[in-house]
Image (cartoon, rainbow, N blue to C red):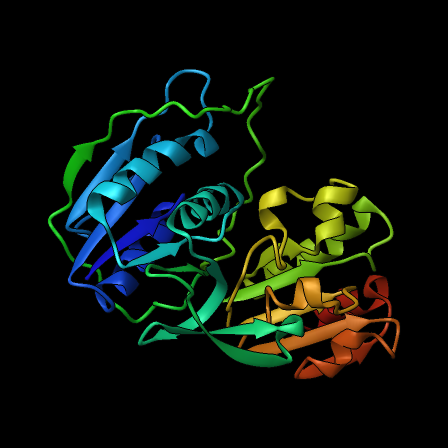
Amino acid sequence: MKAFVLAERTDAAAELCAGARTMADEVVLVAVADMEVPAACADKVLHVALPEGAVFDDAADTVIAAFDAETPGVVLAEPTKHVKVIAGKLAAHAGAAVVTDAIAIVDGVADNMYFGGVGIKKQKAAGEVAFFTVGAGVFADAQASGDNAVEELAWVAPAKAVKLVSSKPIEKSSVDLTKADVVVAAGRGFAAEEDLQVARDLCDKLGAGLGCSRPLAEGVDWMPKETYIGVSGLMLAPKVYVAAGISGQMQHMVGCNRATTLFAINKDKNAPVFKQCDFGLVGDVKTVLPALVAAL
């Protein structure tokens, strides 16, 4: 069997290719634009160069053409917004559905979480080709291999291209949260942007990366969008996760429930997060976090 890997980030490409190697005899990685291809990760690397003015999502028709030529039996996709667009279009083309946020895949059957991780269900991909989105850490123990034979794909212009109106560089966080052993996540319990400093101080003490719930990244824009943790953001599995000022709604918790140990801090003793954490502390983040920093 042949596996197709769709990824946007180099580290994710390496891990997904390693996972694909456990499922298929041949691994094909699709590399869009200027993604740095990991060394010795796949048998074949299909490179898609973006024409001027085109965006990542516009590569879908080119990827579909490559998919038809390669006829893979399984597709593994990194769950980023851009890759999800291509994976969705590809699955629709193949008459299949995508099993999202797989945390384990055995014999074509995936385990994934629901209701914020309070339960795990098993899903078998529908259709002749199995499609899965897979977050960081699922194939951490697998080993990638391959000659990385590069093939340049001919551009297939989309029938309806995305119109790029403007673009600007986004702020990059100093820590890759997908690699961090310790993550502190800030939520709406922080009343003002300047209050986030106490969360940063705690990160400095713990050697942690700072993430957030969706409102802080897409509501008030206090944090970069790449640090949003949740169902349509990052899916993490750190050793330690500190949820500070986060209520514990499913949309967020599904992004962190694979943490080895989960700490919660919230001033509402009835917050749902306390039913899902290993250790909970009732209190205002503006009071609790400075006290933690002083004690560490």
Assign the N terminus to one quadrant of the image.
Answer: bottom left
Residue nearer the viewer, 219 or 244: 219
Assign the C terminus to one quadrant of the image.
Answer: bottom right
Regarding residue 147, the answer to whether it shows in the image is yes
Regarding residue 32, the answer to whether it shows in the image is no
Q: Is residue 155 above or below residue 277?
A: above
Residue 212 in the image: state x and y as whole percent. Answer: 68, 55
Query: In the image, 245: left or right of 207?
Result: right
Residue 85 in the image: state x and y as whole percent. Answer: 50, 42
Query: In the image, 239: left or right of 289?
Result: left
Residue 93 in the image: state x and y as whole percent. Answer: 41, 45
Residue nearer the viewer, 3 or 295: 3
User: Residue 56 is drawn in which quadrant?
Assistant: top left
Q: Is residue 248 above or below residue 260?
A: above
Q: Residue at x 54, y 39 (%)?
A: 172
Q: Residue at x 80, y 45 (%)?
A: 193
Residue nearer the viewer, 177 or 105: 105
Q: Residue at x 69, y 62 (%)?
A: 251
Query: In the image, 264: left or right of 92?
Result: right
User: Residue 45 is drawn in which quadrant?
Assistant: top left
Query: In the image, 168: left or right of 202?
Result: left
Q: Is residue 241 above or below residue 168?
A: below
Q: Residue at x 81, y 51 (%)?
A: 195
